[in-house]
Image: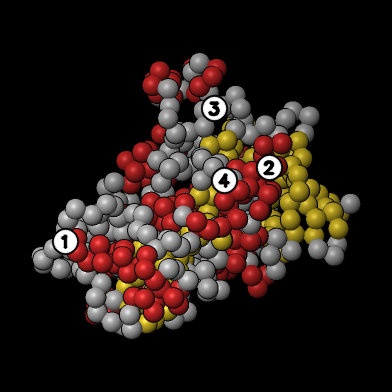
Amino acid sequence: MKQEAFDLVVVGCGVAGLSAAAAAAEQGARVAVLERAPKEERGGQSRYTEAYLRMRSESEVTEDFETLMAENSSGYVDPDLIGEISRPADARAPYARALSVVEPDVIGSLAENAGPTIAWLKQFGIRFDFLPTQFLTKSQPRLLPVGGGLALVEGLAARAEQLGVSFFYETAATALDMDQDGRVAGLFARTRGLGPARFGGQVVLACGGFEGNPEMLARYIGPRAVFLRPICKGANFNRGDGIQMALDVGAATSGDFGSYHAEPIDPRSGVSEPSVFVFPYGILVNKDGARFVDEAPGTVDAHYEPVTRRIFEQRDGLAYVILDAKHTRIPNYRLSIRTNKAPIAADSIAELATAIGIPAAALESTVARYNGACVPGEYRPLELDHLATSGLRPPKSNWALPIDEPPFHAYPIISANVFTFGGLKIDAEARVLNGDGEVIVGLYAAGEIIGTFYRHYPGATSVLKGLVFGRLAGTDAARRRNQM
């Protein structure tokens, strides 16, 4: 078996893994990056995302950042345990030392280190700006890297290469290697065409969730996961290997394994993230032609996920947004439609129903009831206008205009699986914890493999989580390399 020795072995070549590699190499560590994809496809999901960052400036997260993270960092917790969680880990009751929740100091570490991480990235040429997004209405600003996630991947990779990091492509980690003292001393891997190898060193697991593993999706999310689709092709490389390897050595878990980040996409399209965010300006109907959700409870950036989850609940996980010609007069409305497929169009509701395979009488009745519930008022498409329906269940809370002006349009929508929620539990320095709440020496995690979210995803925090904890992991591992 081939043997390689490094101070740090990073599994995954997205922004989390590359941040870890570059940060460690800057401190003089010998670093290897293992990437399942070929070089031209490196970067996983990071390569395809626009990389929204929930920051009000390049140095500060938004005011609601820590509150939203905390609100979505656990399931129902026994109130008696909340006090235990606030105590130092070694002083807690044994049953509270590794609860499946995100620790407050981890959230604090993410918020505190966001600004310094952006400043660090800027040092080697990555630029940031508040650019237009796909959200026509939004409640919070989004800072973006100029050039999106691909710019982050290529900028970080270039920095790592400049520092002498070794890259091993088409290489998949298979198991962690523990020494006699219970520390992670390396890992086993296999490289396409070359067979098995052992890489010695501390390990950062930064290889994503299990979006590309149908067995794990069915096991954790359930049989309806067959109606989900990864948000981009890069997600197919995320097969949950890192999670399983860590569980095999006793790692604790965090995050909701039965859930995922949902985004509305057009199933006809094969492009990366073919999102359809125009639904607040029409109505959503299922395959029976019935409405099932308030399409516009608030700004689209804050509410698209719960609406998309309701789409996932419908028969075959499919719905259609029904629009009339008025939506084409919304300023910059095309920003909200990323699919490369044209809408299904017709001159009447009955013709549109036939074209999308819905009983015409059912769709005509649904549209008529909705139109009858619309009331006069001031329509302001780019802000919450509270132009709501009257007496309709479910209601439509904003932008409720009648659907009566041909041509009529429809887009099919399913829920994409942007990333899974369940993963590993870490401390504030990105060190993986075991079931007793103790650090597994030599093992770190960064990115979506860290189990963070429950119920709802606080938008524009995932890429930031990868960048911050990747950098923290690499820095800490480099500092401790002589102690191994």
Residue at the disc numbered 3: 98
Find disc 1 in the rendering and name its residue. Answer: 387
Residue 284 pos. (x, y %): 36, 63
Q: Is residue 274 left or right of residue 473?
A: left
Compute the Cα span from label 3 to label 2. Answer: 18 Å
Label disc, if present, on residue 221 of the rendered structure = 4
From the top left corner, tell me how far across and down residue 436 is, in percent.
60, 24
Name the element at disc 2. Answer: helix
Crowd rating for badge 1 (residues with CA inside 10 Å; few <14, some 14–19, many 20+)? many
Q: Which residue is mark 2?
A: 244
Image quarter in which the C terminus is found: top right
Disc nearer the start of the sequence (4/2): 4
Q: Classify residue 164 by image quadrant.
A: bottom right
Pair 1/3: label in front: 1
Of the numbered discs 1 and 4, the one sitting upstream in the chain is: 4
SS at badge 1: loop
Q: Is residue 325 above or below residue 88?
A: below
Estimate the spatial distance between the alpha carbons at disc 4 and disc 2, rounded to whole Å: 16 Å
Q: Position of residue 262 (x, y in %)?
A: 46, 55
Tell me which numbered mark, 3 or 2, is placed earlier along the sequence.
3
The label nearer to you, 1 versus 4, is 1
